[in-house]
Amino acid sequence: MLHDPPGRVSIGARTREVMRFMGRDMATEAEIVEYEPGCKIAFRTVSGPLSAHGYRLVEDAGTGTKFTYHADADLTAVYRPFTVPIKWAFSRRVRADLTRLKEILEGSGASS
């Protein structure tokens, strides 16, 4: 994820993420709309293949940390007939990415 301005997280800052999805690289630019340092970042897309909003939340969970990622997307008319398979594929991709992140953070992931 690239961040503009670099190194600074604040409301209004822009991010650019590239995700490999359904065989294609998809770039999305988002704006940070809510920021609680060390806890929550909420976003909304400003460009890309779909309109989306959501948040990433980090919470204390006793002996560990709970990470929540939530996103809602509005598909354009051309993609609406494919809502179910797109939602399934996206959820599968996010779960795999979060599993990999957990492995890395817990030290069991291989370096890449």
Image (cartoon, rainbow, N blue to C red):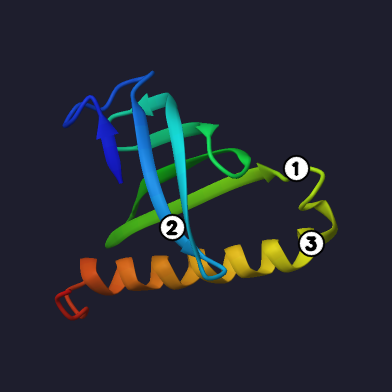
Neighbourhood count class around disc 3 (C-alpha, 10 Å): few under 14, some 14–19, many 20 upward: few
Considering depth in this image, is 36 or 91 the residue closer to the camera? 91
Question: Mark 3 or mark 1: which comes first in sequence?
Answer: 1
Residue 9: which quarter of the image? top left
Q: Which mark is first along the chain, 2 or 1?
A: 2
Is 56 left or right of 13, judged from the image as shown?
right
* Whole-percent x, y for residue 39 in the image: 34, 37
- Where is residue 92 shown, x and y percent of the image? 56, 71
**Gap in angstroms between the C-alphas marked 1 and 2:** 19 Å
What residue sits right under mark 2 in the picture? 19
Tell me residue 76's x, y (percent): 75, 42
Task: Give the residue number, with chain letter if any, for mark 1.
Answer: 76
Tell me the quarter of the image containing the C terminus.
bottom left
The secondary element bearing badge 1 is classed as: loop
State the residue in front, 7 or 107. 7
Find the distance from the CA under tag 3 to the CA under tag 1: 10 Å
Q: Name the residue under label 3.
A: 82
